[in-house]
Image (cartoon, grey):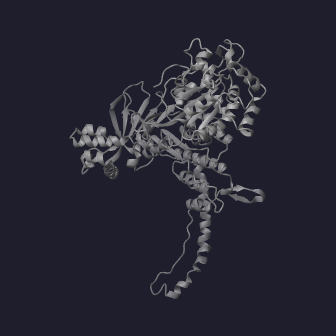
């Protein structure tokens, strides 16, 4: 059995989200402040903490209006059930999938309340809500609704103080096919069903040189405690017994000789008349505790040259981070095996495993993570299988691209519809669903491209897809020039942009993915004029159509698609929701038009390149002749580094101005599949 889906309501940015989990490893990606940490936090509080408490700030921002509406309904003498429905509650729903053929359901059995023999899912609901019968006391003494609308801060102060007293966690099993069929459960039932583990992003592995740190050594105590439990593996118990015997031998020696030596420190007390008449003589006793020895006096060392052991802090942060994670996983496994009641589900959250790891090590880590459970089970006692789910949140493009689309869940922070722009919530994009139905060759191409180029598409604010080397190399210079010339426009240099060199033959393959990610993207491509479809390249004034696959996909409804139509396209026609295409256009109306970036660059700087022709058609031919003298790499590097006194082509600047802006209409269909803006 495993957790198939998680639904969360009203917790911070997770206002109303649904997350599908993989049976083995699920990867959480997204920009900063998109709700990734909130996911592990609510799971920690509702599945692990024994005394769960939330504060007002833990509720989603949209919940504040719900509180005001509930107050209005209460003071208007509305029905209690209606008022309670208006009150926000933090809710976590776990959809557990199990095998109907299994012999017994163990700790899941109490949560199965449906009567459908074909249903293979159980629904667990954990909800932080107003206690039964507490409505009157919760709103007692609260100002009138009219006063609250004028001074909401005072109202929220009341609510902040009353939440811990009048709100509590309620747990029940619910029929997946009938929400009225419920069974109230206890927290102990939930703890038996789901065991959790958390490896936080902040692991205390500071690079300290002034004093030694023992982060790894402290894990030993936890491993010892687990191995000491009654249900631990026999092999672990033997090791614990051996440690205890060794310490006992030392204890015996200390009792015999060490105590007498310590007494030598006590005679000074006689100067003050102690012990005096009838007083008890002092005796020392030193007790050794294995746990304290492991925590405070046992240090991890690395073997060094000449037999000198190096302190834990002397190893690299990346290696220490990796060892820390692995030791934690071993500890989680042993704790799972030592449970008196074997949990039906074990889910482990790992935050930012890439910390201090070089890119190749990051890729190896995510590839090997799924094998850890199997290896630990094989090394353990017979029958020690470990059905564990990993949820990994990361900012690493290396980990994200290595994991594959099926495992990725993309967290996106967006404005709440029809609300103020600063009221935001999380949307979760499931790439398994987003790429469903796409041909295998397209899925394979995208996965391979992202892996080979180490693209950070999942973490960028905006993206630029460019035709080739020249555009990619010169793009930062063009952006800098634009911002210097037009200082009032939004600054792209202060936004996190990813640049992908994809070429006109492949850019359209990314349309669906970019639309799905709702990522504002500029696609810069070439006009690629040809005389006829399948014909050879020619100057724009000599051609009739384009050979560019990206442009053809964008304007797929234009039949026939001629160069005259393309040159007449308006800025609006070049925009589809959060995507915009940019290709060569005349610098002036009815002027000359380049076929490639180099042509357009030369035409935008005709005087600099010594063009002498007087007609648009002649200028096009002359620009193409000049461009042919350059290697693309030499051209790009020269004008990016050695000579920066030039003007960027108009089509490029128009596209960047659009990209810099933040206004965007979300689109549900890509240009290649049709459909308008939503």
The image quadrant that residue 224 belongs to is: bottom right
In the rendered image, the residue lying farthest to the left is 77
The image quadrant that residue 651 belongs to is: top right
Residue 662's x, y, as percent? 51, 35
Left or right of 398? Residue 113 is left
Residue at 42%, 44% in the rendered image:
46
Residue 464's x, y, as percent? 61, 32
Residue 362's x, y, as percent? 64, 41
Which of the image's four quarters has the C terminus?
A: top left
Residue at 60%, 60% in the rendered image:
245
Up the image or down, 73 lies above or below 303; here it is: above
Left or right of 21? Residue 71 is left
Residue 416's x, y, as percent? 42, 36
Left or right of 124? Residue 549 is right
- Judging depth in this view, the residue of 427 and 318 nearest the camera is 427
- Judging depth in this view, the residue of 313 and 452 nearest the camera is 452
- Judging depth in this view, the residue of 88 and 211 nearest the camera is 88
């Amino acid at each position: 059995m495993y957790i198939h889906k998680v639904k969360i309501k009203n917790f911070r940015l997770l206002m109303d989200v649904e997350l599908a989990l993989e049976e083995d490893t699920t990867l959480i990606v997204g920009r900063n402040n998109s709700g990734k940490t909130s996911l592990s936090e609510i799971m920690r509080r509702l599945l692990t903490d024994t005394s769960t408490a939330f504060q007002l700030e833990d509720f989603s921002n949209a919940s504040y209006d719900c509180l005001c509406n509930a107050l209005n309904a209460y003071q208007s003498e509305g029905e209690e059930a209606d008022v309670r429905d208006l009150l926000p509650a933090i809710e976590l729903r776990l959809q557990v999938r199990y095998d109907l053929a299994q012999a017994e359901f163990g700790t899941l059995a109490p949560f199965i309340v449906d009567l459908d023999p074909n249903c293979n899912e159980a629904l667990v609901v954990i909800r932080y809500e107003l206690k039964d019968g507490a409505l009157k006391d919760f709103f007692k003494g609260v100002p009138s609704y009219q006063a609250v609308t004028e001074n909401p801060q005072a109202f929220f102060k009341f609510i902040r103080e009353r939440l811990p007293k009048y709100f509590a966690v309620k747990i029940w099993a619910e029929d997946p096919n009938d929400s009225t069929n419920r069974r109230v459960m206890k927290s102990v039932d939930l703890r038996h069903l789901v065991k959790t583990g958390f490896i936080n992003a902040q692991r205390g592995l500071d690079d300290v040189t002034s004093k030694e740190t023992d982060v790894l050594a402290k894990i030993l105590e936890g491993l010892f405690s687990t191995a000491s439990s009654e249900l631990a593996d026999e092999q672990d118990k033997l090791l614990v017994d051996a440690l205890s015997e060794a310490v006992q031998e030392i204890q015996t020696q200390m009792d015999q000789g060490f105590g007498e030596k310590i007494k030598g420190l006590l005679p000074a007390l006689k100067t003050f008349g102690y012990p005096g008449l009838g007083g008890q003589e002092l005796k020392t006793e030193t007790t050794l505790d294995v746990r304290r020895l492991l925590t405070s006096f046992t240090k991890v060392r690395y073997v060094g040259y000449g037999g000198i052991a190096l302190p834990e802090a002397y190893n690299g942060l990346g290696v220490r981070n990796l060892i820390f994670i692995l030791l934690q996983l071993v500890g989680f496994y042993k704790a799972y095996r030592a449970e008196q009641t074997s949990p039906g589900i074990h889910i482990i959250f790992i935050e930012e495993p890439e910390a201090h790891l070089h890119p190749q090590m990051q890729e190896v880590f995510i590839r090997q993570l799924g094998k850890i459970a199997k290896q630990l089970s094989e090394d353990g006692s017979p029958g020690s299988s470990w059905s564990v789910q990993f949820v990994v949140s990361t900012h690493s493009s290396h980990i994200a691209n290595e994991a594959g689309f099926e495992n990725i869940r993309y967290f996106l922070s967006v404005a709440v519809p029809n609300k103020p722009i600063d009221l935001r919530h999380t949307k979760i994009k499931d790439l398994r669903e987003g790429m469903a139905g796409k041909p295998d060759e397209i899925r394979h191409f995208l996965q391979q491209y992202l892996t080979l180029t180490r693209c950070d598409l999942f973490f960028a604010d905006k993206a630029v897809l460019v035709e080739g080397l020249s555009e990619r190399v010169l793009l930062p210079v063009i952006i800098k020039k634009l911002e210097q010339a037009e200082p009032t426009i939004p600054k792209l240099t202060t936004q996190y942009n990813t640049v992908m060199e994809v070429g006109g033959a492949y850019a359209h393959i990314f349309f669906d993915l970019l639309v799905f990610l709702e990522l504002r993207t500029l696609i810069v491509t070439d006009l690629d004029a040809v005389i006829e479809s399948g014909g050879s390249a020619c100057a724009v004034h000599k051609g009739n159509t384009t050979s560019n696959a990206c442009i053809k996909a964008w304007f797929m409804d234009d039949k026939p698609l001629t160069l005259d139509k393309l040159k007449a396209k308006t800025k609006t026609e070049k925009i589809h929701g959060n995507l915009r295409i940019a290709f060569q256009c005349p610098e002036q109306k009815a002027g000359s038009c380049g076929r490639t970036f180099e042509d357009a660059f030369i035409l935008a700087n005709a005087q600099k390149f010594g063009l002498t022709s007087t007609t648009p058609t002649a200028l096009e031919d002359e620009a193409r002749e000049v461009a042919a003298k350059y290697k693309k790499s030499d051209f790009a590097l020269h004008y990016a580094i050695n000579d920066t006194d030039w003007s960027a082509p108009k089509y490029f600047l128009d596209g960047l101005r659009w990209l810099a802006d933040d206004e965007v209409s979300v689109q549900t269909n890509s240009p290649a599949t049709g459909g308008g803006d939503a």
